[in-house]
Structures are given as structure tokens and as C-alpha cells.
Amino acid sequence: MAKNLTNKNLAILTSGGDASGMNAAIRTALRFAMHNGYEVYGVMHGYQGLVNDEIFKMEYKSVSNTVHTGGTILRTSRCLEFKDPEVQKKAAQNLINRGIENLIVIGGDGSFHGVEALHENTELNVIGIPGTIDNDMGYTDSTIGFDTACNTVIDAILKLRDTITSHDRIMILEVMGRDSGNIAINSAVAGGAEYVIVPEASPVDPVEIAKSVKKGYDVKGKTSTIILLAEGVNYLKDDLIKEISEATGRRVNHMALGYMQRGGNPTVADRVLAARMAQRAVELIMCGQSGRVVGIRGGDIYDTTVLEALRIPKEFDEKLYDLAKVISK
Ligand code: ADP
Ligand code: F6P
């Protein structure tokens, strides 16, 4: 929906879990908007900072030397009180009091609920950019930070392979993704993990996996085994350790890679994705659009309503999952 076209002040915030490439998105949004005659403001600490009026004017140089950095220079937060429409209105008023009527929000699906709420309940023009390592939003093929997180996982696989091979051990490597197995599946294919267990697939039987792991050593000549376990099914950890160690007689280690996956220099893919998405977000602001989010489909940047984006479930890539199961074990 188009609101006010004439206001030339734009604020940017990052919300939810940080993701590498958020700074590349902030940088492009700021510089492309300034190039088109906008004054740009940063909101610190996501929606919490919007509520607390942590708003400051940004300059062209505010984003110098940030394109390669992880985290978010605007900081982030999880702000539960922001679900309250009265809090949303108060927060929006902090921008309006400064004459700012345009806002770009970079975050995951939770943050997009905030985009929808601000769009519906206030006078702001609000556009969303998907920034989350989880890649769990159905309307877009990828999200900023996902590629970098997967690269961190495959680096971990490489290093863990050295030590488990040396000790004849087996490694269960738990990776993030909330309820999504996308980081696990993509990293398994790219990093050569022997097994991948994700919440979207039919339940696996730890006894069957244990038998298969044993066969890997006895019949296929494997010298190491890495199992990628998505955090959404990490309740299987203890059963897997028990069954596999009993079947193979080997020590089974478990390691949660954790917050390592959120940090570090963004990959080229994430930096370019961030730049392309931020450009489209500013273009939407320039057209007076609101309540829309930017995505990528088949390599093309596009935009849709935030309601539609939140409605579309993430399709499970069963073909890639089946391939992962076949090629490494
Ligand atoms: P992400 O955006 O990475 O999915 P969260 O789910 O934690 O992360 O959401 C980030 C923030 O978005 C929340 O802390 C809250 O401030 C805001 N948010 C989440 N759900 C809603 C909602 N239903 N209405 C308004 N704001 C919301
Ligand atoms: O959404 C990103 C993410 O890193 C998820 O993969 C993970 O489940 C969650 O955030 C962890 O959240 P927190 O930072 O609140 O511990």
C-alpha cells in the first residue's frame, strides 16, 4: 500500500538474531538512499531502541569499512513488549517526532510481524529485508546470513574430521536453524557429512542409524563419521550417542556449534544478496510503498506483501535431503 511519497527521511534497524551480511545491507541502504536524496537515521537495538528513542543521524561515512564485518553495527534485540499495539504506536511516534516517515527493518520472521504491525497500526512506510541465518522463510529462496553460517559449518566439519579420524571417534555436530533443517542439509551436502537429521523429514530411528554407521566401518571402509543434527531435533542426541557407541564400540562426541554460526565475515554471496535486497528496499520506499518485504526467487530480486511472505510455508527440499543421505554415508 502506498502511503506518503514526499518524506525524504529514512530510518534503518536490525532485529532478532544477528546475521552476517546485515552490515552490507545497512551500507547499501544508506548509500543508495543518500544517493537518491534521503537523509538516513539509524535505530540502535532493534524495536527496543525504537521504543526507547535510540535514534541517531547517520552520515555517508557511518558505514565505512563495514561491508566485510559480521554482527550488526546498529545492534539488535528481542523486544517482547513490541507485540503490544500501544507500544508500537509509541515507538513509531519517536520517528515521526523527528520527521522520519520511512523505515527499513532487517530481520527474520518475528521481525516481519513487527513490519506488518507498524504498517497496519501507524503512519510509517515500512519495508522488510530478510536477515537470519535460518533461511526459514518460504517466500524467499535465501536470507542474508545463511550462506555465511553454512560456510562456518563446513569449516567445522573439515576441522572436526581431522580429530575424529585421529582418535577413531564419531562426531554428532549440532547446528542452528531453529525449526528449520536448511543449515544442516546444505552444510551436509557441501561439507560431506555422512548423516543429516532434520525436523522436516520423517522421524529417524537411532538404532537404524547406528547399524548403518557400523556398516560404514565394517563394509564400506569408512575411517570417520560425522552426523549433522539440526537443533530442532536435538532431543535425539542422547539416544544417538547410546545406540551408536554400543553398535560400533567407538566413542561418540557431541558438539553444538552454536553462536559461531552467527558471526564472522559475510561470504561474497551474502554481501551481494544484502546489497541487491537493500537496493530494492530503498526503491520501494522511493515509490511510497509500505508493508512489503524483499525476497529472491530463481536468482531474481522481487518483493511481496509482508502478509503473503508470512503466510507461505518454507518448502522442504526433499530432493536435496535425499541426495545428502545417498552421497556420503
Ligand atoms: P527473528 O526476527 O530473527 O525471527 P524473533 O522471532 O526473536 O527474531 O523476533 C524479533 C523481534 O520481532 C521480537 O523480539 C519482537 O520485538 C518482534 N516481534 C516478534 N513477533 C512479533 C509480533 N507478533 N508483533 C510485533 N512484533 C513482533
Ligand atoms: O534465528 C537465529 C538463531 O540463531 C536460531 O538459529 C537459534 O535457534 C536462535 O537464533 C538462538 O536465539 P538466541 O540468540 O536468543 O539464543
Image: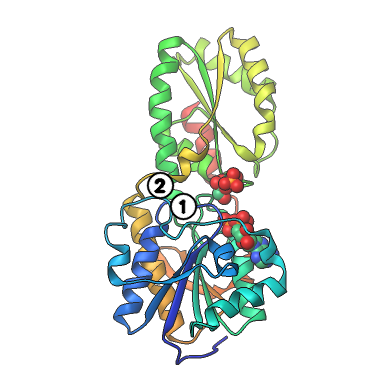
Residue farthest top in this picture: 249
Q: Quadrant of residue 200?
A: top right
Q: Residue at x 49, y 66 (%)?
A: 13
Q: Residue at x 48, y 63 (%)?
A: 44
Q: Residue at x 54, y 77 (%)?
A: 126
Which coloring applies here?
Answer: rainbow
Closer-to-camera residue (311/287): 287
Q: Which residue is mark 1?
A: 19
Instruction: Residue 140: give x, y in percent of width and height.
Output: 51, 62
For badge 1, the amino acid type reads Ala
For badge 2, the amino acid type reads Thr
**Which of pointers 1 and 2 lies earlier in the amino acid sequence?**
1
Closer-to-camera residue (203/48): 48
Alpha-carbon neighbours of circle 2 within 10 Å: few (<14), some, or many (≥20)?
many
Closer-to-camera residue (289/171): 289
Residue 110 visible in this rendered orientation of the protein: no
Closer-to-camera residue (89/120): 89
Q: Horizontally, is 297 left or right of 179 in the view?
A: left
Q: Is residue 157 above or below residue 131?
A: above
Instruction: Residue 67: give x, y in percent of width and height.
Output: 31, 57
Q: CA distance from mark 1 to mark 2?
A: 8 Å
Quadrant of the image containing the N terminus:
bottom right
Name the mark on residue 303: none
Q: Which residue is mark 2?
A: 148
Q: Is mark 1 within 8 Å of ligand 2?
A: yes
Instruction: Residue 36: give x, y in percent of width and height.
Output: 32, 83
Disc 1 vs disc 2: Cβ atoms closer than 8 Å? yes
